Image (spheres, rainbow, N blue to C red):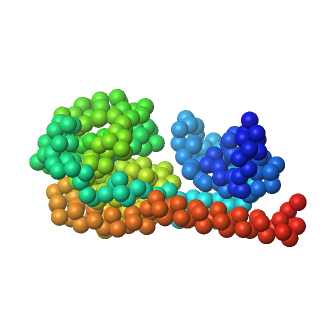
Amino acid sequence: HIYDELMRFQPNILHTHDPLNLGVASIRAAHKFNIPSIFTIHQLPWFITTYLPITIQVKTFLENRIWQYSQWFMQQCQEVVTPSQQIAKIVQTHTGYLPHVISNGVDLDLFSMETKYPNEAKELCKKYDLCPDHPVILYVGRIDPDKKVEMVIHAAAKVMRGVDAQLIVVGDGKQRQELIQLSQSLGIYQNCRFPGFISKHGDLPGIYRMARVFVTASEIEIQSSVVLEAAASGLPVITVKASSMSEFVIDGHSGYLVRPDDVNHMAERIITLVTDHRKSKEMGQAGRIITEAHSNQRFLEEHEHLYEAVFHKQKIYHQEGILA
């Protein structure tokens, strides 16, 4: 069925985002129709092994085998793309192949510092039962083990011992109920909200704008879309110094990078921003400037340039008879 559809569509390039079954089918189709293929990397091997209950030795063995497979898969493609420089360097270290870096992009019109309507923050506080006089600590994303949201909740609990603050955990996942119970056991449930998934076409942009600081503890981000959304909304970001995070959050300028698994360090940085509105605002403005290099428009333009280059190169190969 895939081949039939491709025969009808007759693409000039195949772009895959999956290195497994669908990706292999895409490569076979590209070879069959003699057209170039492009692969975008969305995960690294240790993102996969994080979920497996295995020993360090088995984890290392599996990651090495995944890297070997990834190297083979990339060799089948004409170009490889990844959204951050740091991830590109990691890929090069393990495979010898340096990918193109093209940011996944963020909608700078949807996620902005401009409110949608008068009294936006006041109305959202009323809707989500928040105190308008107390600063909001915000997390947005999946609530699964790899995201380490429990670290955010523990840090928020430390903050709330001395500061009147509130925590909103937006999103859903396997750990949602467990983390609600955690907030209860820490005695901060009355100052926490777990509204579940909120659409970016609904209240989410406004929730970013009404918050004082965005916090995440995930260590396995290729490029965090929610970090870009928060920064685009003028919100300073506190995140761990891991993966590609330092590429999107400048420590002490647009937010803070904290040590992985260091709850005390995270709590200290949150206190700095929830108690200093001026610093929070200045860092949020700096983050907005950073995100302007990651606009959706730039994402589209850079992909278009890549497609044109790959197509032109393939055309020359055909003309010179390099490819049959």
Quadrant hosting residue 282: bottom left
Q: Is residue 18 left or right of residue 228?
A: right
260 relative to 319, above or below: above
> Furthest residue to the left?
133
Q: Position of residue 3 (x, y in %)?
A: 76, 41
Residue 71 in picture, x, y percent from top left: 71, 55
Q: Answer with the quarter of the image where residue 322 lies.
A: bottom right
Residue under the image location 72 percent in, 68 percent down: 312
Query: In the image shown, does 164 or 278 lie closer to the viewer?
Result: 278
Q: What residue is drawn where x is 74% and y is 44%? A: 8
Q: Nearer the viewer, residue 314 or 70?
A: 314
Counting labels gives 0
Closer to the camera in the image, 315 or 285: 315
Quarter location, residue 78:
bottom right
Q: Is residue 128 visible?
A: yes
Seen as rendered, the residue at the extreme front is 8
Residue 156 lies left or right of residue 77; in this view the side is left
Residue 150 at least partly seen? no
Q: Quadrant of the C terminus?
A: bottom right
Instruction: Point out the image quarter for the N terminus.
Output: top right
User: Can you give x and y, in whole percent of width and height, for residue 98 in the image?
Assistant: 64, 65
Residue at position x 54%, y 46% from top? 47
Residue 151 position (above or below residue 314): above
At horizontal 35% and vertical 53% (from top left) the residue drawn is: 110
- Which x, y percent locates residue 315? 77, 66
